[in-house]
Image (spheres, helix red, strand yellow):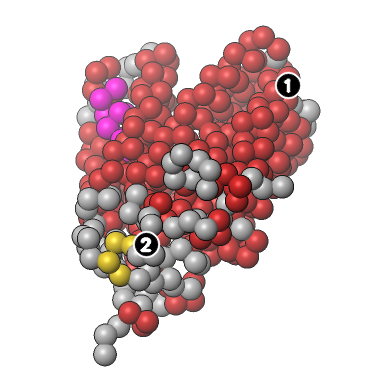
Amino acid sequence: MNLAKFLSTRTPFFYGWFILGTSGSTQIVRNAAATLTLAVFMYPMAEELGWSRTVLAGAVSVGGLASTFISPVTGWLIDKYGARAVLTSSIMILGVSTFLTGWATIPIAFYITYGIGRIIFSSPVQIGSSVVVSRWFIQKRGRANGILTFCHSIGMTGFPLMASILIGIYGWQVAWHLLGVGVWVIALLPVFLLLAETPESVGLLPDGDKESSIASTEANTTAVIEEINWTLKEALRTPALWQLALAGGLLFVIHSGTNTHMAAFFQDAGLTSNQAAAAVSLNAIFTGLGGLGWGWTIEKIKARYCYAMVAAVMSICAILFSTVDSLIEAWIYASLFGTALGGMLVVPSVAMADYFGRSSLGAIRGFTEPFVSFSQAVGALFSGLIFDITGSYNYAFYTLSIVALMAILLTITATVPIHKDNKKG
């Protein structure tokens, strides 16, 4: 049963905002498998089960690498069977895997249950929610994806907090069970009952427009043109797709190379564990706020310029991190970096939809997402190795700053390709 067709013409506002809220619920609950949530479980699980923290953290890498191969299939499934089917089944599986993690008392079982959750976190929920939102919004696509990122930030903050409270009351096993149930309660029914693939499928138009026309996304002017949709095969022939995909991968090298080690780095710089934790929390909060800001910005400025601006802020932050020697500096730089991360989560999704249209967006995002998954694994490992070799993260930060400069070059030259159907003459 799907209520979208019934409700879409009866809501006092554009039904796309319902779609955004529903998609946002999936962004919130995917944090059941977030690394920040696992961090809360790490101490009690390691103490009771006698596992090393490396064993526990290894499940993150396994799930992330697996999603590299699963993302292209996910994108194809979204285009073939719809985001509703993919997201509904993903939320169901995430709830089950999270629930079963409470019974995972041997490493192989934990790698299977939590690893499946990481796959859901990294691939189908990430791709499916942003694709369906980008299909419902064109002129307001930036702010819609910004709100979607803010929902993720709510989950980043809320799920570790819930886990901490539940562990304190019931212990880590029951806490996993209850988080799994929470996944179903928050997102399963909304996705199953309320989600619709496109506004056209329920007799509406993107953004709630009354006429079948859209604004040119590259120029960001009022010039009205017909939307051009690229297939994956066509998009692969354009330099822009490869530039945006590679740049996105480079930004996630910086993201994981910094965020994974942020708390440890700040403690090396003289902060207490609580002060470092506060910096990490500020980073998460400003990721959500930054998503809102960048979502508004990309509606005013060309996507490639926004992409380059995000990379520039990340480059500056990498250098600033190497100079931290006080609590205030740590908190300011963590907040600024979080703001950039908000843009990193919003701008690529909007750019792909703006450049290549909506019809094959699932397949196109499925192709580019492995760049993200692989880069996350590389970044975290790279910074760890640099620290182990040199005893400091500074050379890692210098290198990550240069990586950001490469991303600037790739994005600022990634002009919107012209589809053969839109060529004059």
State the CA–CA distance, disc 1 to disc 2. 54 Å
Q: Reply above or below: 251 against 33.
A: below
Q: Residue at x 38, y 33 (%)?
A: 288
Q: Reply above or below: 23 against 374.
A: above
What kind of secondary structure does the magenta stretch mostly adopt?
helix
Residue 408 visible to an observer of this rendering: no
Residue 198, image x and y in percent? 52, 57
333 part of magenta stretch: yes
182 part of magenta stretch: no
Residue 327, image x and y in percent? 27, 17
In the image, what residue type sits under mark 2? Glu
Q: Residue furthest top?
A: 169
Q: Residue at x 42, y 15 (%)?
A: 273
Which corner quadrant of the image does residue 48 belong to? top right
* Secondary structure under the numbered disc 1 in the rendered image: helix
Whether residues under marks 1 and 2 lie with C-beta atoms below 8 angstroms apart, the answer is no
In the image, what residue type sits under mark 1? Gln
Query: Mark 2 sits on what residue?
Result: 211
Q: Residue at x 59, y 29 (%)?
A: 38
Q: Residue furthest bottom?
A: 425
Q: Report the disc number at residue 173.
A: 1
Q: Reply above or below: 119 against 155.
A: below
Q: How many badges with numbers are in the image?
A: 2
Q: Residue at x 39, y 65 (%)?
A: 212
* Secondary structure under the numbered disc 2 in the rendered image: loop
Residue 218 visible to an observer of this rendering: yes
Please report the bounds of the magenta region as a residue range: 331-341
Foreground: 261 or 149? 149
Question: For this view, does 411 lie left or right of residue 173?
Answer: left
